[in-house]
């Protein structure tokens, strides 16, 4: 038994329809279109039964007898059924497309199941989809409170990071990563990431940034540049602001050339800003 598919949208080629129906009056147009709709919704030929066809066309038996010869010209009557070549072709196309999309969805689901790992912890099982962009590979004990996770150090880093998603998981990872690096180093690396990221690229997920230790890519470079020029970070922020208008007031303070700007005056002048 074939699966029933609900096809709500019937394609209509209006130029062809108008070209084929210029001789129909408004009553014949209505009846013909209602029969096409019935054909599409049931996905099968219409019965060669005047009583039913009149019902489908919302016509009285007398009206149907008058318009039947005109409407019948659009169909092929065979073996007690009315067939419509164009609708049959569109139905076949729609069903093939549905089947193709269904197979693709099933294949995707199968691949996801294959790529799902089951990790056992002392307290519970944790399922991780390794296809996800954001990997979450560590857990924090249930005894750790939200207050412990959202401590002052994490909030300082979180306020700096531009993409605010996955806060709880980010806090869990932060509590692990901060053990092997300093907050100042992490803040400096994140600052550098914000400054140097191309405008046409999206920020990576906070948990991805932490879990993949991406801050380590910038720590050495940041430290070296800061030794050469102590005002390196401020200058880079100003360059980024001049280039595309990127500025984070809650992190950097007021914008350049505005009251309360925290950038030293001589740096503002060097970068072409009016104090």
Image (cartoon, rainbow, N blue to C red):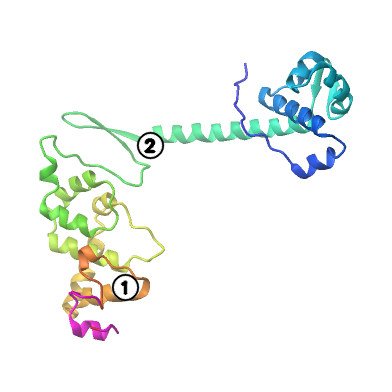
In front: 54, or 242?
Answer: 54
**Mark drawn on residue 199:** none
> 46 left or right of 8?
right
* Location of residue 172 (image quadrant): top left
Binning the other alpha carbons within 10 Å of mark 1 as few (below 14), some (14 to 19) or many (20 upward) gives some
Question: In the image, is residue 147 above or below residue 95?
Answer: below
Q: Report x, y in % for residue 153.
A: 12, 55
Q: Main secondary structure of the magenta part?
A: loop
Task: Locate residue 145 relative to residue 37 in the image: left or right.
Answer: left
* Residue at (19% x, 32% y) in the render: 121
For residue 115, the mark is 2
Between 141 and 155, the one lying in front of the other is 155
Helix, strand or loop at mark 2: loop
Residue under the point 16% across and 30% down: 122
Where is residue 22 shown, x and y percent of the image?
85, 40
Image coords of residue 132 (percent x, y): 36, 43
Q: What crowding class fits label 2: few (fewer than 14 Cα within 10 Å), some (14-19), or many (20 or more)?
A: some
- Which mark lies nearer to you, 1 or 2? 1
Q: Residue at x 27, y 46 (%)?
A: 166
Span highlighted in magenta in the image = 258-274
Provide the residue designation for mark 1. Answer: 241
Total labels: the figure holds 2
Residue 48 in view: no
Rendered position, 257 above or below 101 = below
Residue 262 is a magenta residue: yes
């Amino acid at each position: 038994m074939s699966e029933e598919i609900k096809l709500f949208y019937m394609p209509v080629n209006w130029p062809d329809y108008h070209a084929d129906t210029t001789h129909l009056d408004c009553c014949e147009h209505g009846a013909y279109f209602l029969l096409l709709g019935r054909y599409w919704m049931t996905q099968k030929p219409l019965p060669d039964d005047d009583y039913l066809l009149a019902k489908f066309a919302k016509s009285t038996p007398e009206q149907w007898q008058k318009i039947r010869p005109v409407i019948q010209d659009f169909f092929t009557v065979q073996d007690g059924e009315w067939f419509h070549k164009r609708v049959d072709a569109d139905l076949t196309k729609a069903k093939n497309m549905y089947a193709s999309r269904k197979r693709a969805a099933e294949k995707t689901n199968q691949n996801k199941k294959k790529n799902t790992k089951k990790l056992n912890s002392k307290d519970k099982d944790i399922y991780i989809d390794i296809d996800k962009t954001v990997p979450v590979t560590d857990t924090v004990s249930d005894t750790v409170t939200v207050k412990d996770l959202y401590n002052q150090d994490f909030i300082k880093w979180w306020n700096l990071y531009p993409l605010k998603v996955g806060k709880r998981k980010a806090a869990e990872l932060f509590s692990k990563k901060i053990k092997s690096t300093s907050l100042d180093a992490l803040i400096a690396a994140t600052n550098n990431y914000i400054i140097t990221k191309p405008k046409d690229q999206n920020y990576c997920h906070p948990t991805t940034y932490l879990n993949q230790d991406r801050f380590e890519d910038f720590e050495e470079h940041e430290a070296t540049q800061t030794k050469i020029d102590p005002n390196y970070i401020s200058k880079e922020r100003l360059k980024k602001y001049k280039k595309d208008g990127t500025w984070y007031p809650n992190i950097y303070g007021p914008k350049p050339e505005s009251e309360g700007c925290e950038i030293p005056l001589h740096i503002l002048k060097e970068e072409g800003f009016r104090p």
